[in-house]
Amino acid sequence: MKNIYRKGIYLGVLFLVFAGVISCEEDFTDIRSGVVSNTKFSTNDTILEVLVSNAAIENIRGDGLELGGTPFFGLQGQYLLGAYINDEYENIEASIVSQININSALKLASYDNPDGLLYETTIDTAFLRLPYHATLISNDSRPIYELDSVTGNSDLPFTLNIYELETYLNTLNPADPTKTNEFLSDREYETNTNSLTAVENMDFSPTGNDTLVIIKRRNSLGDLYKTDTIRYTANANTTVPLPMAIIPLKKSFVKEVFLDNYETPNFESQSNFNNYFRGIVIDAKEKTHASGERGGALISFNLSSTGVGATSSLIEVYYTNTFFKSNSTEIDTIITNTHAFQLGGIVNGKYKSNNKVYPVNNEVKLQGAAGSEAKIEILKGTQLTDLRDKDWLINDAALTFYINQDSDTTNTANQLYLYKRGEDLNSNPISSHIKDIFTEGLATFGGFLEKENNKKDHYTFRITDYLSDILSGETDYNPPLRLKVYNTSDTQITDTIFKNYNWNPKSISILNGDNNLNGVRRAQLKISYTEKNN
């Protein structure tokens, strides 16, 4: 029988076995953490070669329907919007597809009108607002923010439109209603071709300066009634406004879809409204600049906040009702109103990339969102057979990937994740978690960015239990591994199945396992072990 043991799991058994030996072997001096220090055993390590290659991503999950419970509750953690252009990586255009939540009790006129006065409604303005992630830098004469949610070049705008969605979004799979539906990130949606933004093909750049909105309220004659200054604060105890992305909408759109449908069958329930108006597509595309310069930015938005507070993503409609005296054109009363409609229900991310094919050289590209992953192969050739023939106690197995210091590291991923990706008999992918994420936890499993001499240097994963199971013969399942930019959903684990989501736009170039090209910085699997001396 081969004596290959896993650290921790077999430590108690080893202690009992060695305790009996200690009683008659005085030269045993130390047993700690599976490492034996004495004249009968020696501790060594070995480095195994690792095959690392580029692995394109066709698509990932664009919805959050199976992300139940804290902190997602059926939505993705973040949604990306914008265009990211980088010569070293894939270009990505990210859009958002969303249903709109309504309040079926809304009425056009809130004024108590016992005399039944006639009135006219004037829409003052309407816009979509999306709260930024931002850090307050100073608040002297005005608040100064640094946006925390932007990747890329925010000085170059991207082209933004909002379209009416014509594809019905269903939570159930139409082909099998017993299953939850799935929307992939490259799915094509049917839309009305007329833009709902006040300016078609508007230029959009993220900025922390948009902390207030000026609303000019006008009566039905077009005369200025008053001016409202709208600031969005985190709570009632502060007056410091938060920065928002403000996207003006066509007044005709909000009138026809919302105001004109109050107290009609289309507004009787959320289901009725979803059938009538299926949602919006916030569409972002790279802008063609006259200078020929290419660029743009991806912005991360959190769309999970509920209600109509400052942290929620809403369509806001500001309108004024002008009431006239009986049988007269003379104005009797003017009432201003504000109604808000939250982005909610089914919300999907949509990514379009240029599917870049990377050359085969000394590096591999990793990119979040709809970018790319790496295929990792270990224990190839005769490695597995050779190791199974050895009488080793496995103390540690560390898989390390070094960063290509000559690559662009401005958008470096702070963490990577490693999972198994095999295939079933029909060549369909099967993705699953590696055992050590369960047995040791994320802190030990690793994948965090580590620095050397203040430089971003490498990522290390500890796969001791996973490797030990293979070497001991407990399992023969050794599929290729996949290395990806870490996403917060990766470790929201409910079972062994790995589900691939990614709204993290970070990227990194790692060196592959080519010893001739990368030397000591090549990708490698280091095994520390204890063996019995002859």
Image: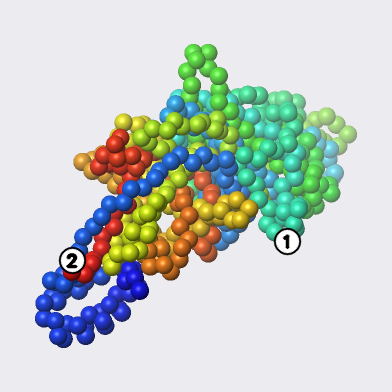
Residue 13 in picture, x, y percent from top left: 31, 79
* Mark 1 neighbour class, 10 Å CA radius: few under 14, some 14 to 19, many 20 or more: few
The mark closer to the camera, 1 or 2, is 2
Residue 55 in picture, x, y percent from top left: 49, 41
**Residue wearing tag 2:** 42
**Residue wearing tag 1:** 178
Residue displayed at 59% across by 31% down: 284
Horizontal side of 288 relative to 263 (left or right) equals left
Residue 127 in view in this figure: no
Tell me the quarter of the picture where residue 164 sits.
Answer: top right
Residue displayed at 46% across by 63% down: 476
Please tell me whether residue 463 is drawn above or below residue 330 in the rendered image.
below
Horizontal side of 95 relative to 373 (left or right) equals right
Horizontal side of 106 relative to 443 (left or right) equals right
- Classify mark 2: helix, strand or loop: strand
Residue 288 in view in this figure: yes
Residue 342 in picture, x, y percent from top left: 64, 46
Quadrant of image for the C terminus: bottom left
